[in-house]
Image (cartoon, coloured by chain):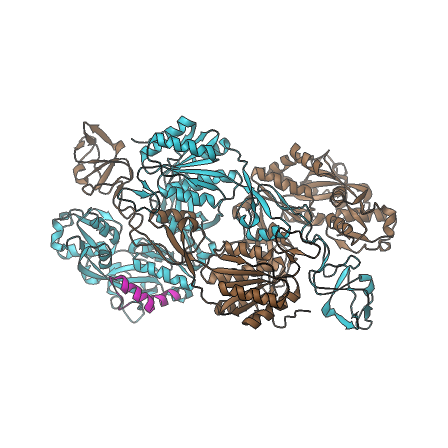
Chain colours: A brown, B cyan
Amino acid sequence: MVTRYLTLTSLEQARSIMKESFPDLDRFEKIPIMQAIGRVIAKPVYAKYTVPEVNTSAMDGIAVRSRDTVGAADQTPVTIDHFARVNTGNIVPPEFDTVIMIEDTWEAGDRFQIHKSAAPWQHIRPAGEDIRENRLVLPRGHIIRAFDIGALATYGITHVEVRAIQVGIIPTGSELVPLGVRPGPGQVVESNTIMAEVFLSSMGAHCTRFPIVPDDPKLITDALRLAIRSNDLVIISAGSSAGTRDFTAEVISSLGELLFHGVAVKPGKPVMLGRIEGKPVLGLPGYPLAAQTILREFAAPLLESWGFAPASRYPVRVKLSQPLNSDLGFDVFVPVFVGRIESTLWGIPHHRGHGVQMATVKANGYTRIPASLEGYEAESELDVLLTTDPGRIERTLILTGSLDPAIEELANLVHDEGLFVHASNVGNSGALLALKRNACHAAPMDLPALSLLPESRFLMQHLPAQDIAFVHIATIEQGIASRNGLDFEDLFKVRFINTRKDLPTRMVFDALLSSRGVESSRIDGYLHEVNGPQAVAAAIRNGFADAGVCTSGVAETYGLQFVPIANEDYELAMKREMLDDPRICTLVSLIKSPTYKTKLEKTGGYDCSQTGLLRSLSENNTLEEFHPALLLLDIKSS
Amino acid sequence: MVTRYLTLTSLEQARSIMKESFPDLDRFEKIPIMQAIGRVIAKPVYAKYTVPEVNTSAMDGIAVRSRDTVGAADQTPVTIDHFARVNTGNIVPPEFDTVIMIEDTWEAGDRFQIHKSAAPWQHIRPAGEDIRENRLVLPRGHIIRAFDIGALATYGITHVEVRAIQVGIIPTGSELVPLGVRPGPGQVVESNTIMAEVFLSSMGAHCTRFPIVPDDPKLITDALRLAIRSNDLVIISAGSSAGTRDFTAEVISSLGELLFHGVAVKPGKPVMLGRIEGKPVLGLPGYPLAAQTILREFAAPLLESWGFAPASRYPVRVKLSQPLNSDLGFDVFVPVFVGRIESTLWGIPHHRGHGVQMATVKANGYTRIPASLEGYEAESELDVLLTTDPGRIERTLILTGSLDPAIEELANLVHDEGLFVHASNVGNSGALLALKRNACHAAPMDLPALSLLPESRFLMQHLPAQDIAFVHIATIEQGIASRNGLDFEDLFKVRFINTRKDLPTRMVFDALLSSRGVESSRIDGYLHEVNGPQAVAAAIRNGFADAGVCTSGVAETYGLQFVPIANEDYELAMKREMLDDPRICTLVSLIKSPTYKTKLEKTGGYDCSQTGLLRSLSENNTLEEFHPALLLLDIKSS
C-alpha cells in the first residue's frame, strides 16, 4: 500500500489550521513554589504583604532624629542622647528618621558623639522598598526562574497557579519493541514516544504513555478512545510503516475528523492532525528526525499558543561551511552545528537521513530552509536556532575530516580540560576544503603510504603547504577484510564492497589495482560505495558482501579476517597559527599524553610509536622530507 | 559589631583560589534516560548495537538485484521474477542490493515489470547508517537534551552515568522564619536557601536544606559539622545581620580554614570561602540580591569547573537606556531588562538595592560592570547575559514612566494576545526621556489638572509634540491621606511625608502650596522624599508620618482617610507611528475593552469615563485645546 499526498498543506497553513481549530486550553494547577521552576504563571501572583513591612536599617549603627544632628561637624561635634542601637535589618522605630553608621560615631559614655549631620532617610530601607502588599509580582505568562522563587518566598507566596495540560501519547507499530528490549532484525526500539514525553514534560506537560499498539485498526481505535477521554491532547506515533499511518488517518476519521494529512515539511511530511470530541490528535511520522520536527514545529507551537513556554531558542547568524541543498516547495529543517573559528561563526549542516538520530545529537542547533528556496551556496549567511548553551561554542574545537574512533577518545579526554570537540566525518577532501575555508580548528586526515599511490594526486592546490602543521595521531593498517580470510587474488570471485573515492581506503585499493594492472570492472561490487571502513566491515559481517578494504582495528571490532596491504598515517592537520591557540595546545598535549596512547593501544589496531609527533614544513626541508604522502595532495610548495 | 574588610580579594582572584583549592569532584550516578534531561554525561556513552543493524528499505517497493534491472527502459521493459516485497523499514534480504519504489513497478501476474534500471543501494538504508556498535554516542560533558534521549533509546541505552553532587545548605539567622510563616516586623522569610536549592538543583545537584540555625556559634558549629559529613559542598547562608556573618567566619576557621572573606564584588561583598575536611564551604551574604550574585558567580562556576552545566546564558549587546553608575574597584552586577524598539536592543538597568528582589524578577538579564570602570553613560553599548528566552523580547512591550496598578492589569490582559509588558517606574520625567530616546513603546504618565499648576513647567523641550499620541487610561483623584482625616490646614501641625519632585503627587502639592502662598519650610517633613504614592501611604499607615499626598485608590488600599485636592489624567503617551505597530493596536484595544474598564472600576479609585480615548495634536487644534496639562511639559508646538 502506498500513501500518496495529492494535496500537501503548507507549513504555515497547517499551523494556522491547528491554532484556529484549538484556540484555548484553560487548565491550570496549584503547585508549591519549590517545584515551579520553568513553569508558566496562569493566575497573576500578588505580594501577600509589604516588604520590608516597616522601615529597617540598611547598616549597623544608631537610629536618630535627623533634626537632632543639624550643625554637627568636626569642629562642632553633636552629642546624641535620643537614639536606638540598630543592626542591619533591624526595625527603625517610628520616632527616628535616619541612621548613622557605627563607624561615624564615637561613644561618649552611654551616648554617641557625631561629627557630621545626617540627612533624613539616610541608610534606611524604607517600608515597601522591594514591594507593597497586593502589588503584582508575576504577571500571567511569566516563566518562573530560580531567583523568582526566592522573591516569591520573601513575599509570603508558598504556592503558584501554573498552566497545566494532560497529554496522552500512543505508540503504534508491530515492528516496535519497548525500551530495554534488544530489537531483532527489522525491529526498532520505540523511542519516539519517549522523546515526546521528555520533550513535552520539559514544557510542563503531564504525559501518559500508552503501551505499544500493534498495526491493527481495532486496537488503535480502542487506544485512541481511551486516550481522548482523559487527555487534553493526544499524540499518536505512527511507527515506521506506511500501512500503520493509513490506519491512524482512518481511525481518526472514524472517531472524529481529519483536519490535515500531509504537510510540505521535511522531515515530517506524513504529519496529520485530527479533532475528536473537540480535542486535538496529532499524528507523528515514524522516522525519528521527522517525529522530532513535528514535535518541535507542531506540538510545541500548539502548547505555546496555549501559553506554555517552549525551550529557549537562541538565534545566531552563521556562515555555511558547505553547500546546503533543499527541496523547493518544502520547508526543510536541517540539524546544524555552530562553531567559531576566530571571528567567524560557522554553521556545519548535518546529514539529513530521516533515521539518522546522531545528526541531531551532534548538532547544537537547526535551521529552516524556506519552501521558496532551493538551498544555499557554501559561505552563505543564514539563521540558526541553538539548542545548547551558546557559551559552549567558545570552548568547542571543530575537527573536520576523516573520522576514526581515535578522535572519539580525544573528545572524552578534552572534557577534563573544560573543552569540547565537534567532529564531522567528511573525508580527506572535506578536511582540505575546511582548512582552506578556515572552517575548522584542525582536520584529521588519513595519509596512506606513498609507495602505493604513484598516480592519484588530488586537491589542495590552493592551500599553502608551509602554513600547515601535522600532529601524528597513530599509524593504522589498511587491508582486505572478509569473513573467511580472502586475499587480493580472491577478489575476482566474490562480491566486493567499496568506499567513497575520497577515502584513503579507496585510494589504497585503487592504487593496488593500478600497481597490478587490474581493470576495476573485473570486480563485482566495485561500484557499490558505502561511507567508510566501518560500513564496509558491517556489510561483510551481515553478508551483503564478501570482501572489502578497511583498517585492522575495524576488522577486529567486526570479528572479520584481515590481510594487510598498506599502512596509513592518521594525522591532525591544521593551520600553523592554530598552534598559538591555548585550546589547540591542550589538544596537542593530550595527544602526546601517555593516557591517550594507552587508550589507543588498548583499543587495538593502532601503532602509537609516532603519536604526538609535530611536523610542519619549514624553509629547510622539502615536501618529500616532510611527509612523502603529502605529495598525494599535490601541495604546491610555493 | 562591625565587619571591616581591610583586604578585599578581587573577583577573579577569589574565583581562582576557589578553583585551585577544589580542582575535582569525582561523583557520578546512574539514572534512567527518562530522568536525564539537563544532566551532564560523566562516562562516555557508546551504542549497544548497530542502527540499523541490517540493510533496510527506505521505501515501499520491491527489493531486487541491480544486475537484473540492467537495460530496463520505457521501450524495453524488464520483467523481474526474483524479488522480495518490502515496506519501509523492512529488512532487505542479503541477496538483493537495491529497492524499486512500488510506484515505479507494474504488476504482471505474480511478477513485476519495470521501465527503468536501478542503481545499487538505491532506496536502501544501509546497515550502520545511523550509528555502529560501540561507537561514541555522547562524550563526557555532553548536556542531555530531549531529542538525545530518543537517540539513546534507539541505540539500546536505558541508563546513563551523569555527574552528581551532594550539597548541604544551612540557613542561619535569628530573624528568619521558614516559608509559610508570616514574618513579624523585623523578621524575614528564609528565602536564600530556597533559592540556592532550586538554583543548584536545576544544575543537577542533590540538595539537603537544614533547619534554620539561630545566631549562636555553638549551634552553627554543630550544623556545619553535620553538613560537612554527608555533602561535597556546604553553603551557609548568613542571615542578614553582621553578627551572624562574623560567627560563620569564626566557625569555619575553628573547624578548618578560611580561604577568603570579603570580595570586591557588589552585591555580595561579604562572601567567604572556607575548607573543612578538604571540602568547600561557601558563605552567602544575607541580602537576597547578594546571595543570588554569589550563587551565580561562585557556586555555579565551582560546579561548572567540576563539569556541571550552568543555566544557558545568551549574550546580547544592548544600548543603555539611562546612565549606569558603578563603584570603581568593584565588579558590579546589575539586573537589566532587554527590550527592542525598532532595530535597537535597549538595556534598561534596574534598581540595585540589595534587598530589592523585584529588580531580578522584572529583569530578563544582567550585566557585569568591570572593577576598572566607574559606570556607563546613557546610550553606551554593553553586554548583557539573558536569563529568559530571547524569543520573548520581540513580543514584549516596554512601558516606561509613572507606574500605577492600572498598568499591572494591562500586563495580565495582554498575555491572552501572546504579548508581554515590561513596565519600569521612572516618573513622568523618565517617561519623557524614554520617549525622546525612542527607548520605550509607550510611556504611562500622570497629567495633573492645569488649574492647580500655574508655575511648574519642565522638560520635553526637544520632543516634537505633534508626534505624540495619548491614550487615556483613567482619571485618578489626588488628595491628602492620613490616618485620621487631616485637611490642608492641619499639615502645619503634623509630620508630613513627601514624594520625588518629578511625580505628579509632588507637583500637585507644590502647586497647592504656591497657590495658597505657603512656604514649604513651614511643613515638617517636606524634605522627606519617598518613591511614589504607595510609599507615602505605607509610611503613614506605619506611623512614620501623619499625612501626605497620594491617590484615592492607594489611600483606600492602605485603609487611610482621604481628602481630595485635584484630579489627574493617567495617560499612555507614545510616538504617533507606534499606532501602526500591531502590538500597540492590541494594547490600545485592550485599554478600550469593557473587561479592562470593569477591572479598574472594581479596583476602586479610577474614573473610567474617558478610558480608551485616543488623542493627538493635529494641525487644526492647539496644544491647549488638545490637553491643557501638556502646557506643564512646556512642549514647543513647532
Q: Residue A421: horizontal and vertical position, in percent?
A: 61, 44
| Magenta segment boundaries in residue numbering | B586-610
Side (left or right) of A312 relative to A355: left
Q: Residue A622: horizontal and vertical position, in percent?
A: 75, 37
Q: Nearer the viewer, residue A637 or A361?
A: A361
Q: Residue B103 lies in what quarter of the image?
A: bottom right
Side (left or right) of B56 relative to B252: right
Would you say the magenta stretch is mainly helix, strand or loop? Answer: helix
Q: Residue at x 40, y 38 (%)?
A: B210
Task: Please give the count of numbered marks on the rendered protein.
Answer: 0
Q: Residue B434: horizontal and vertical position, in percent?
A: 35, 55
Q: Residue B58: horizontal and vertical position, in percent?
A: 70, 61
Rendered view: B403 above or below A420? below
Q: Is residue A455 visible?
A: no
Is residue A155 magenta-colored?
Answer: no
The quarter of the picture where the C terminus of chain B appears is bottom left
Rendered view: B15 above or below B587? above
Is residue B604 magenta-colored?
Answer: yes
Q: Residue at x 38, y 52 (%)?
A: A159
The quarter of the picture where the N terminus of chain B appears is top left
Q: Residue at x 53, y 63 (%)?
A: A227
Q: Is residue B345 visible?
A: yes
Q: Residue B514 lies in what quarter of the image?
A: bottom left
Q: Nearer the viewer, residue A88 or A174?
A: A174
Rendered view: B366 above or below A378? above
